[in-house]
Image (spheres, rainbow, N blue to C red):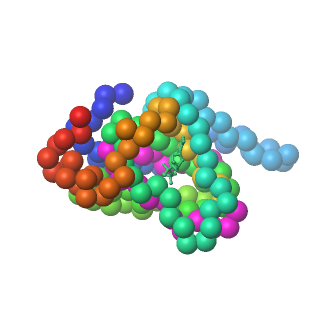
Amino acid sequence: MQVEERGNIENCRIIYFPKVTDFRGNLSFIEENKHVPFEIKRVYYLYDVPSGATRGGHANKQLQELVIALSGSFDVIMDDGYQKRKFFLNRPHYGVYIPCKVWRELENFSSNSVALALASQAYDESDYIRDYDVFTSMIKDDTWK
Ligand code: TYD
């Protein structure tokens, strides 16, 4: 996928996965480049999140992610520097796609929630923008490189 000039809130969206319903319990599955618009290079998960905590709080130059509430619920707030959108996740058969160059915060975690993230790249701290003022100035000045 081509790296965009800047993040665009319009590209942040809910993606539904196949759901195989069964009296023994339901099953969903995710295939790279099919149910998510990138190759999955890394998986990580957030758990034991204390009440009132906020995760995220960064944007990424190139990383794309898809975040799923495997258990429990939480909000994902995304911000492209111009607009914000909030997505409430509370079921494991869908997730929210976070394109690159979008500031994200995860908050309002229910007890025992698990946030699963599928990521398009291995962990690389140099891809992260962790200062919101730097993020907004990078958008304004178009200095993403
Ligand atoms: P951080 O990116 O701040 O977590 P989040 O955005 O989900 O709130 O990561 C917290 C710490 O974990 C930080 O020191 C980097 C490290 N980390 C890794 O080593 N590998 C990873 O894949 C991730 C996501 C984080």
Most extreme residue toward the bottom is 52
**Residue 116 x %, y %:** 60, 47
**Residue 72 x %, y %:** 66, 61
Does 77 appear above or below 27?
Answer: below
Most extreme residue toward the left is 141
Q: Is residue 115 visible?
A: yes
Residue found at x 70% / y 62%: 112
Which segment did they paint magenta?
Answer: 91-112
**Residue 88 x %, y %:** 51, 61
Residue found at x 32% / y 55%: 131
Residue 32 figure quarter: top right
Residue found at x 38% / y 44%: 128
Quadrant of the snapshot with the N terminus: top left
Answer left or right for 114 relative to 11: right
Answer left or right for 103 relative to 66: left
**Residue 15 x %, y %:** 50, 44
Give whichever of 3, 16 is nearer the camera. 3
